[in-house]
Image (cartoon, helix red, strand yellow):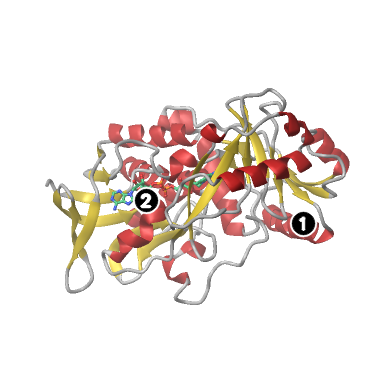
Amino acid sequence: MKPAAVVIVGAGVMGASVAYHLTARGWRDVLVLDRSGGPGRGSTGAAAGGFRAQYATAINVRLSLLAREKFVRFKDEIGSDPGYQPAGYLWLATTPAELDILRAALRVQWDAGLYEAVEVNADDIARLSPAVAPGVALGGTFCPSDGYIAPLRILDGYLAAARRHGARLQWGTNVTGFRVDGSGHIVSVETDGGRIETAYVINAAGAWAAGLAQCAGVPVPVTPLRRQVAATVPCTLLPPQTPMTIFAGDGFHFRVRDGRVLLLWPSPGVSGRPFDIRVDPEWLSAVARMAHQRVPALRTVDVDAAASWAGLYEMSPDKHAIIGPAPGCDNLYLINGSSGHGVMHAPALGALLAELITDARFSSLDATALRPSRFAEGAPNPASGLL
Ligand SMILES: Cc1cc2nc3c(=O)[nH]c(=O)nc-3n(C[C@H](O)[C@H](O)[C@H](O)COP(=O)(O)OP(=O)(O)OC[C@H]3O[C@@H](n4cnc5c(N)ncnc54)[C@H](O)[C@@H]3O)c2cc1C
């Protein structure tokens, strides 16, 4: 097959963002390969569309701030609407200990430049998200510039812009291995359609990143984690501008999208296989019970099992992205492990990886906290009290 200067494996939002940012920096001959039949068949198509800068580590706050800038000018730069709606994220604490965690995160956010995030009391919560049962939350935090984005529009926008800049995109091509020379350098990518010689490979394979990297003998600590979304039947009980409302203690959260209320609760439910994305009926019942307790208005609407879905988070050991050259393989670059924050951070991570490959340094922000070698160095990012 025709050689390429750069082969990007995976045409989800990460691969698309890197393809766009590389071609915008003048790279030509960029080839994006994906084994699926079209856009959004991996995790990107399963995302709930939340955007937030309320994190508990400076690097995640800064990634969000950079991404937000890019969403705001996405239409001018990329030519389509990324669906950014600043409806806010409302974190709720049900115990003093949870409130302490939210307050500590707030200090990190202010230090990192997210000045509009504030602490809220029970009255504020009743005003901001009136459907929450009174008395359930004793306080929380709110950031009005957090909110929602449209994952598939972002993906399609980046893919189209990369193609306009000359990137080639090939669906239905499975990468099965790499040919590696004696010094651990990849010389070609093996696919079910043939061999492609290349100078650089980018692993943008989402939840499947570890298996792909293993083909080059590189351990990448990314594991799949099933995440389920329960959708109610169509209803108008809650206004579409309801902020993402999220319980800090157990991660239960809800939003309104496309005329339904989406319920999320990060309990994987019963699952036999690591890449299983079936919806667990017992999980659906459990999340509905939780919603009825915390959002009483929802007692009158059913969960629609047929409209509910599941997908895979791409977890890293410290729940932070992994970006940079793979240890032991200098022309394999990783953009992996966003741990469920990938759509919102893709604009930032794609730009950062393109900077690193082009100039051997980050210029938009210092992302060395996300270097792949941090796990072997025993220097992971700190555990976060927030998801
Ligand atoms: C239920 C759910 C809700 C979520 N909600 C949010 C949210 O609100 N906000 C947010 O920011 N993020 C959210 N996420 C996380 C987000 O979806 C992911 O972080 C993001 O989509 C990861 O993008 P990606 O491009 O790395 O992976 P993917 O979109 O999975 O793309 C990887 C691609 O690689 C391809 N591939 C893999 N192996 C190979 C191979 N060997 N050869 C060729 N192709 C290969 C796959 O076919 C796939 O298309 C959610 C995820 C889930 C599951």
Q: Left or right: 276 with respect to 287?
A: left
Q: Quadrant of the C terminus?
A: bottom right
254 to 102, vertically: above or below = above
Give how far across and how far down residue 149 sits, in percent. Answer: 55, 35
Q: Given the image, on which type of amino acid does mark 1 rest?
A: Arg
Number of marks in the rendered image: 2
At x 26% / y 39%, what residue is drawn?
171
At x 83% / y 46%, what residue is drawn?
136
Q: Which residue is mark 2?
A: 354
Confirm whether residue 65 shows in the render: no
Give how far across and how far down residue 282 sits, in percent. Answer: 60, 47
Residue closest to the eye, 142 or 152 = 152
Residue closest to the eye, 89 or 236 = 236
Give how far across and how far down residue 371 sits, in percent. Answer: 45, 65
Q: Does mark 1 have its CB less than 8 Å from ligand 1?
A: no
- Please tell me whether mark 2 sits on a helix, a strand or a loop: helix
71 to 139, vertically: above or below = above
At x 50% / y 52%, what residue is drawn?
226
Tell me which label, 2 or 1, sits earlier in the chain: 1
Q: Given the image, on which type of amino acid does mark 2 rest?
A: Ala
Quarter where residue 289 is shown: top right
373 to 236, vertically: above or below = below
Q: Which residue is mark 1?
A: 103
- Please tell me whether mark 1 sits on a helix, a strand or a loop: helix
Disc 2 from disc 1: Cα separation:
35 Å
